């Protein structure tokens, strides 16, 4: 299927071009697409070019100019194709549809090209807010039962169905699944402990950073977390001072050897915003051109010792992500491997040709039942599994953790047991005795009172108190979870 065929099918509605992440079902999640993309490890001596991908994101049907059942703000037109391919496809569709062409010329304030996309057209789309960094967002729940009941002895993230979440990105009280009720139960006790810790720290004059760190440490004791977005940024990865080996567009899967991903953390924000706001840093239509560096194994830390690959936290703190120096940029820059120097335009031409074929193939796969699309491969490469795979021993593991760690603390109060009577009993039917004497009205009142404060509990437990960034559509994580 070529680009014209794909856009004809998009136009007719035969092929949807919005993110699959909002429409995953359990069967799709259970299929194994293989760990084909590698997460970039935070190690010594990284000195690499990261070509972060861009997306075209249009909150209406680009073929009609109106939101409809296919494309809207909730499910925008967001093909997995490269930006240049999307804009070229729109141009070709406009050439066949004068009304569509008139709409886009009014929308963008430019004359639409008749063929391949131009940088003028790209800049117009960017000014209109239709160009975003490609950030893959997964709704996940973190579980850590410390090795009991067959669970791993470390924290694992499981995906949940985003269609079941409300507009706040969590669950409605009436229809909350068992893992959310578990998170509420454990974190309700931990909130009491966290409030006490914070009160004591404030009384002793602790600074804000210390208080926040200690609050997070308390909430980290919960074996079940609240649902949160896990945001990953994919990119092409090449050593900065090496000439890329030729890729063959006739074998597009070769590109996967160069695909990496990393958590979308604050370190990405400054270079991305610079590139989005300053045309000098944004010369390529399909990729942002960044340089990632970490200290080498001969650099010394503050304590005088050299960095090693085991110093993940210190390496992360020292890691820099910047817009690539103009002398090395994709357009106008050069690369030398010590024996020869080449123009990057020429050096990366095979890479770009291969990438176009790869994402054309991926777009076709996304329209096929069971297709190996980019998003599905990303999910498999991140080793995310659906939470349904964690439920077999979930309640016994909750009960064991409660009994060993929470039951005999002063934070396990009658109010907590009343407010969470349903889960308390589901976790262990013998617990029904502890709430048997309570009136149903009292239990409902306790649950309702807790529900009024659940937003505060979720906010404190997850640390997600800020709204998504308008430029990115997601909120970057403040720090990298190096345990992932």
Image (tube, grey):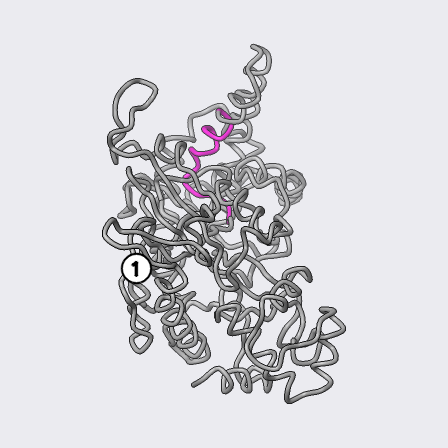
Q: Residue at x 42, y 40 (%)?
A: 480
Left or right of 336 in this view: 163: right
Viewer-nearest residue: 349 or 285: 349
Q: Residue at x 74, y 80 (%)?
A: 102
Q: Residue furthest right?
A: 106
Residue 112's place in the image compared with 388, above or below, is below
Residue 344, percent from left and from top: 39, 59
- Quarter of the image that includes the N terminus: bottom left
The answer to whether residue 421 is visible is no
Residue 157, percent from left and from top: 39, 49
Left or right of 424 in this view: 165: right
Residue 243, percent from left and from top: 29, 57
- Quarter of the image that includes the C terminus: top left
Q: Residue furthest top?
A: 204
Residue for badge 1: 244
Left or right of 191 in this view: 337: left
Q: Quadrant of residue 27?
A: bottom left
Residue 470's place in the image compared with 443, above or below, is below
Q: Residue at x 28, y 66 (%)?
A: 246
What's the magenta region? 214-227
Q: Residue furthest bottom?
A: 96
The answer to whether residue 50 is visible is yes
Viewer-nearest residue: 18 or 248: 248
- Number of residues whose C-alpha sits closer than 10 Å to that of mark 1, classed few (under 14), some (14–19) or many (20 or more): some
Q: Quadrant of residue 37?
A: bottom left
Q: Quadrant of residue 65?
A: bottom right
């Amino acid at each position: 299927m070529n680009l014209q065929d794909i856009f004809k099918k998009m136009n007719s509605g035969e092929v949807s071009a919005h993110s699959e992440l909002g429409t995953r079902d359990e069967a799709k999640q259970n299929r194994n697409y293989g760990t084909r993309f590698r997460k970039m490890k935070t190690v010594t001596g990284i000195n690499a070019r990261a070509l972060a991908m861009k997306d075209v994101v249009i909150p209406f049907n680009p073929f009609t100019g109106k939101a409809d059942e296919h494309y809207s703000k909730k499910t925008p037109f967001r093909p997995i194709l490269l930006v240049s391919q999307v804009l070229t496809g729109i141009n070709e569709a406009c050439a066949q549809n004068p009304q569509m062409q008139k709409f886009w010329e009014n929308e963008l304030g430019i004359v639409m090209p008749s063929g391949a996309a131009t940088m003028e057209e790209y800049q117009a789309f960017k000014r209109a807010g239709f160009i975003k960094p490609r950030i893959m967002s997964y709704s996940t729940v973190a579980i850590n039962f410390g090795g009991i009941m067959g669970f791993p002895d470390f924290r694992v993230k499981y995906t949940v169905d985003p269609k079941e979440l409300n507009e706040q990105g969590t669950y409605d009280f009436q229809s909350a699944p068992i893992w959310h009720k578990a998170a509420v139960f454990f974190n309700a006790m931990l909130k009491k402990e966290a409030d006490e810790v914070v009160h004591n720290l404030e009384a002793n004059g602790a600074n804000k950073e210390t208080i926040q760190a200690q609050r997070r440490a308390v909430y980290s004791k919960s074996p079940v977390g609240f649902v949160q977005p896990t945001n990953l940024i994919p990119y092409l990865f090449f050593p900065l001072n090496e000439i890329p080996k030729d890729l063959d567009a006739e074998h597009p899967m070769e590109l996967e050897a160069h695909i990496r991903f990393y958590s979308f953390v604050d370190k990405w924000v400054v270079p991305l915003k610079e590139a989005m706001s300053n045309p000098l840093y944004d010369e390529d239509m399909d990729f942002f051109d960044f340089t990632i560096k970490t200290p080498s194994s001969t650099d010394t830390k503050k304590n005088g010792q050299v960095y090693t690959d085991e110093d993940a936290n210190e390496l992360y703190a020292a890691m820099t992500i910047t817009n690539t120096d103009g002398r090395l940029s994709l357009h106008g820059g050069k690369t030398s491997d010590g024996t020869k120097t080449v123009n990057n335009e020429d050096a990366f031409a095979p890479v770009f040709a291969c990438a176009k074929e790869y994402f054309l193939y991926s777009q076709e796969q996304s329209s096929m039942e069971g297709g190996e699309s980019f998003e599905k491969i990303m999910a498999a490469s991140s080793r995310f599994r659906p939470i349904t795979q964690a439920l077999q021993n979930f309640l016994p593991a909750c009960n064991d953790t409660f009994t060993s760690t929470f039951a005999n603390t002063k934070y396990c109060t009658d109010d907590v047991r009343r407010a969470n009577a349903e889960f308390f009993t589901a976790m262990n039917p013998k617990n029904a005795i502890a709430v048997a004497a309570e009136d149903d009205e009292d239990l409902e009142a306790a649950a309702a009172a807790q529900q009024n404060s659940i937003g505060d509990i979720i906010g404190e437990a997850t640390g997600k108190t800020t709204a998504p960034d308008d430029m990115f559509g997601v909120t970057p994580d403040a720090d990298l979870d190096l345990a992932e």
